[in-house]
Image (cartoon, rainbow, N blue to C red):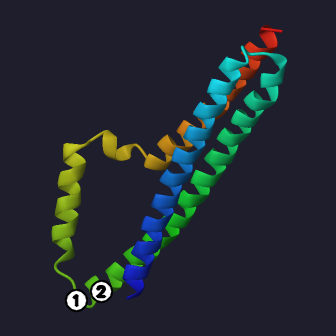
Amino acid sequence: MFWKEHREQLRQSETQRSTLTNFLLVVTAGLSALIVQQKFSAGAIPLSIFISLLGIYGALTVAKYYERATYHLSQARALTATLASLGTLGPESELDERRAEHYRQFPRLHRLRLHHLWVSLHLGVTLYGLALLIVCIISL
């Protein structure tokens, strides 16, 4: 029961992270269209700054979602280890063997942390907003 609850909380964090990212990307796209429509005028400067702030907010928030997901994953793993030590689960060596096979199939990719990609995407939005700001300032 506790294991299932932690796994559900982990999934919820992942779902919230992707929903937030989709929302922020849609808002960024809409604001970008508005900035282009205004021909990078002085009135677009606050919108560019807002895009950068959205990127920072997104990066911090997805990092927090990762922290929560990691917490629930560690709790679920601790419960799994307890069940394995009690002999309730199958042999742990089989899980280790499957994990090692996975790492052999993806020797570089398994080292790349997904949360780094999520945070990088939002930091990219921040840089994009700053680039729009520079274009707006240059266009004055």
Q: Is tag 2's residue or tag 1's residue first in the polypeptide sequence? A: 2
The residue at 51%/44% (across/down) is 118
Residue 81 is situated, as x and y percent measured from the top left of the image, at 33, 80
Does residue 41 appear anywhere in the picture? yes
The answer to which image quadrant residue 39 occupies is top right
The answer to which image quadrant residue 80 occupies is bottom left
The answer to which image quadrant residue 30 occupies is top right
Instruction: Answer with left or right where residue 3 lies relative to residue 133.
Output: left
Secondary structure of the residue carrying numbered label 1: loop
Image: 64 above or below 6: above
The residue at 46%/59% (across/down) is 14
Instruction: Answer with left or right where residue 104 lies relative to residue 1.
Output: left
Residue 23 is situated, as x and y percent measured from the top left of the image, at 56, 47
The residue at which mark 1 appears reads as 88
Q: Amino acid at mark 2?
A: Leu
Does residue 128 appear anywhere in the picture? no
What is the CA distance from the residue labelled 2 to the residue labelled 1?
Answer: 5 Å
Image: 94 above or below 137: below
- The quadrant in which the C terminus is found is top right
Circle 2 residues within 10 Å: few <14, some 14–19, many ≥20: few
The residue at which mark 2 appears reads as 83
The residue at 42%/66% (across/down) is 11
The residue at 17%/80% (across/down) is 90
Image: 45 above or below 93: above
